[in-house]
Amino acid sequence: MPGYRPLQDAGRPVRGARSARAVPVLSFGAVGGRFPQAARGVAGGVTLHDGVAEVVRMQVFRDRDDGGRRLADRLLALRLRDPVVLTLPRGGVPVGRVVAERLGAPLDVTVVRKITSPDFPETAVGAVTAEGAPIINDRLKRMVHPDPDVLADSIEKERAEARRRVEAYRGARPAPRVAGRDVVVVDDGLATGMSARAALSALREQGPASLTLAVPVCSPEAADALGDVCDRVVCVLCPPRFQAVSLWYESFPQVDDAEVQRMLAGAGA
């Protein structure tokens, strides 16, 4: 469909996509191990599970605030001149709030909605923001075979929901200026990278001075694949056996809309 942007798979551009470039992935703790949660009770050193080395406790985040503090330490080293922090709600907002406080930057949200097919509601074939062009994963689209009209309806439905959520979260506050600024997009982790790609692609069109994706923990493959939509990926941990974002936090509760609104209002977004 016109206006679609193809999604890269693990750094290999699909036909018609802009050539990929290597994105700097600034990781400060690439670790191994299959069961990171098993190491949370370890006071130090390395524990073994079935002969596989686990991460030590200090490499697991206590909660999203802890992830935000450790992430902010890495971002401060970049000496961004005019930063603005945009978070992916809902889980990215507690992380971004801490980052924005440390950077002395305004805080706001960039809302992304996943695009699904009614026949496969658990499989996201793409993502869309309130304003940007939808991002479609051609490989998953071929697997699901959604009806073109149904897919178009799903895109418009999710775009409308993204706009509604932006208005609900932001209220009467104006959107922060993006053009010419150092934009930092924050989430609580990077798994597939589909939502991050949609957010970064939409923001790139607004002319930021630089565009950084910042997460406490990321999948190496997903980070490497974002070279065509951002200037750098900053993460605290980049484990080769990533598995899932939640496994790297001791406390990973759901964040509701009311909490997002409260944090944004408290930050003066």
Image: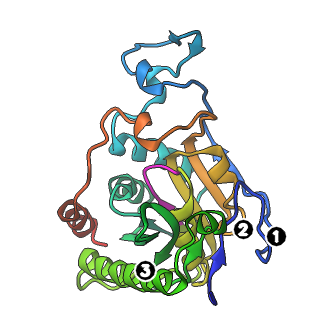
- In the picture of the structure, the residue carrying the numbered disc 3 is 154
- In the picture of the structure, the residue carrying the numbered disc 1 is 19
Residue located at (22% from left, 69% from top): 265
**Amino acid of disc 3:** Ser
x and y, in percent, of residue 242 in the image: 56, 37
Q: Are marks 2 and 1 in contact (CB under 8 Å)?
A: yes
Q: Are marks 3 and 1 in contact (CB under 8 Å)?
A: no
x and y, in percent, of residue 102 in the image: 41, 54
Q: Residue 173: which quarter of the image?
A: bottom left
**Amino acid of disc 1:** Ser
What distance separates the C-alpha of mark 2 from that of mark 1?
A: 7 Å
**Amino acid of disc 2:** Asp
Task: Give, as a single range, the part of the protein colored magenta.
Answer: 184-190
Residue 78 appearing in the image: yes
- In the picture of the structure, the residue carrying the numbered disc 2 is 228
Residue located at (59% from left, 33% from top): 241
* Quadrant of the drawing holding the C terminus: bottom left
Tag 1 or tag 2, which sits nearer the N-term?
1
Q: Is residue 97 left or right of residue 182?
A: left
Q: How would you rate the neighbour count of disc 1 (Cα within 10 Å): few for under 14, some for 14-19, many for 20 or more?
A: few
Tag 2 or tag 3, which sits nearer the N-term?
3
Q: Are marks 3 and 2 in contact (CB under 8 Å)?
A: no
